[in-house]
Amino acid sequence: MIKMTNSQKVIRFLANNTVPILFLVISAIGIPLSGYSANYLVSEVIVRLVRNSFLIVSLLIPILAGMGLNFGMTLGAMAGQIALIFITDWGIVGIPGMFLAMIISTPISILLGWWCGKILNMAKGREMVTSYIIGFFMNGIYQLVVLYGMGPVIPIRNKALVLPRGYGIRNTVNLAGIRKTLDNLVVIRIARVPIPVATFALILLLCLFVLWFKKTKLGQDMRAVGQDMEVARAAGIRVEHTRVISIIISTVFAGYGMILYLQNIGTLNTYNSHMQIGMFSVAALLVGGATVAKANIRNVFLGVTLFHLMFIVSPMAGKNLIGQAQLGEYFRVFVSYGVITISLVLYEIRKKRELALAGQSLAQAQEAQP
Amino acid sequence: MNIAVPITLGKRFVKSFGLPRIIIALFLLSLFILAPIAGVNVGTSFSDTLNRFGMNAIMVLAMVPMIHSGCGLNFGLPLGIIAGLLGATISLQINIPGPTSFLLAMLFATPFALILGWGYGELLNRVKGGEMMIATYVGFSSVAFMCIMWLLLPFNNPTMVWGFSGRGLRTTISVEGYYLHALNDFLAIRLSRHLVIPTGMLLFFALFAFFIWAFLHTKVGTAMTAVGSNPTFARASGINVDRVRTLSVVMSTWLGAIGILVYQQSFGFIQLYMGPFYMALPAVSAILIGGASVNKASILNVILGTFLFQGIVTMTPSVMNSLIHTDMSEVIRIVVSNGMILYALTRRTEGAR
């Protein structure tokens, strides 16, 4: 390894952390402009951490397997929502309701994840755009099931859930039965900021699982597949099988994540909640300094904090700066998409450069031989 | 043997044309057959289909140059649409009534399309192999960026800005009095009360389709096809690959800009803010339904695909509504269009990178 001077190290650090640094700057400008108190911001960020971390952690395993950002996590979100509709219909409330929802979502997620993985195996090299379209496609099927199937085919007894016309689920489902049940189970207050310990414990458990999983045989296989599919195949790893499993795991966790997310919010927007989830989760992960090929748990938490800090601050900052809150809203949408665009571009450019470098060093090595 | 021949022929046909396309075509055919039974006027339906065909065809045509040069499906179509929107709003700001404003809108949209397209093309040259995902997000982020701009740009024509504050453009702006039906009414043929053929709009599309077809047969056009089918070979034969790709992206972007103007003159409204957000997907799936693949497309694919796709979009609501009294058209549209894109993405493509 070549030794780097200090200035080179600094440049390298800046280059590798462009996006998080950019966000720190935006937040540093936005926070004083918004005029929010530190206490308010901290408690809001904690709420967002509780809401979103689990969903974002579900993105990590496909990245490990070299399949990029799994925009197909919306499939898991749909499974979670269907499960929540069922438990609301059956009137099962509280912690048992939540865990029942998780149990119901699991087989649906596995099925959807398996299907998604199979399709992604047919579209190697363009997994991301394919998973993105899969999300749209499944949204159509989801609407078919929830808007037309629920009622005549799948029995729904609770009249409050069903549209006045007699079938299909209403646009908003009140999840009063499980609202904040997990969040309020164990709460510690530090400087008047409530911290939902139980949810954090669950998130921590998932993080530990991911860390442990990376060390297992299957996790190592995934890493190998992610680095080079052909080499992995030559080493006797069932490449396709491994990739499908990584997507299944991701989808199942996304389903659980969606249930946690909605128990925090308390209402389900039947036809909208899942649509934006993929985009926001991916953006948050990238803001945390992850790339398409490399992501870890630190990125998740840093990302949620920075991304949502910007999200909380920008409408108010826009209002105080220009006099229009709408401007701040558009600004945060722009930043979310902009971040994903920049990260994708940087990743492709870096990949190309590394390929060129590898080619050069190979050529040098061959010339050096007598 | 007598039976075996048609079967193998049929199999070859299915293979070359693709099963999903056949299903979609049969579906549309059955909709047209069912229409009179369901009490839907076939004349009106056909007229609507033609109209929507004309509205969307140029945006579908905008896919062709980029597919030819190997840049994949142009999910970044919203960028071209934004150039068109800028042209439209500037034209309305100058406030010259009548069809002249349509020419002005085209004129003003062009420099934006060229500049944005050039930048977009240069970007895509740096990310070869990952174009489609990045194109999607270039489209999204430019739409979101323009949302901010529509609020801030100093437009002040009272037909366009919010009435009470006098600032910021409205979400939808009527083009009535400007270029509403500028092309639709040109030489329009009224066959009956229900069946109107928007000749002007169809001719306008035919003109563009002919230009693109002719262009693809010029030297530069052939070079474009060569770059798309085998970039290494193209480079070896002395073609500047990056320049040809940029040219194709500029063309696609410009066609997108013109496409949205044609759409507006028929639709009657300029849709700003999140309006262009998902406009790429219908155009992408239309050309795929027409028989194109990720790296192969022709003018015939455009015509066939737009007709099939818009036919389904127009026919399903009316026919389904009268037959089963439920409007499942939205679900069908989502499943058909995205299913088609999925099908195309999962095909093995020659010269895959």
Image: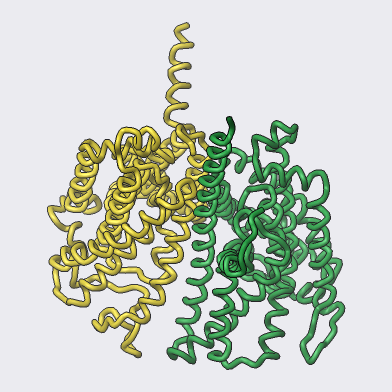
Chain colours: A green, B yellow
Foreground of the two, A24 or B17: A24
Residue B116 is left or right of residue B336, and the answer is left
- Place of residue A277 in the rendered image (x, y in percent of width and height, measured from the top left): 61, 64
- Place of residue A70 in the rendered image (x, y in percent of width and height, measured from the top left): 62, 54
Labels in figure, total: 0
Foreground of the two, A10 or A369: A369
* Residue at 54% across, 45% down: A355
Check the image and report above or below for B15 versus A164: above
- Decide if residue B44 is in sight here: no
Check the image and report above or below for A265 versus A64: below
* Residue at 58% across, 54% down: A135
- Decide if residue B277 is in sight here: yes
For residue A170, what is the image quadrant? bottom right
Residue furthest to the top in view is: B1
* Residue at 43% across, 27% down: B16
Check the image and report above or below for B342 versus B260: above
Residue B212 is left or right of residue A301, and the answer is left
Foreground of the two, A131 or B327: A131
Check the image and report above or below for A145 versus B224: below
- Place of residue B113 in the rendered image (x, y in percent of width and height, measured from the top left): 28, 61
Residue A350 is left or right of residue A267, and the answer is left
* Residue at 80% across, 58% down: A211
- Place of residue B164 in the rendered image (x, y in percent of width and height, measured from the top left): 34, 90
For residue A118, what is the image quadrant? top right
For residue B110, what is the image quadrant? bottom left
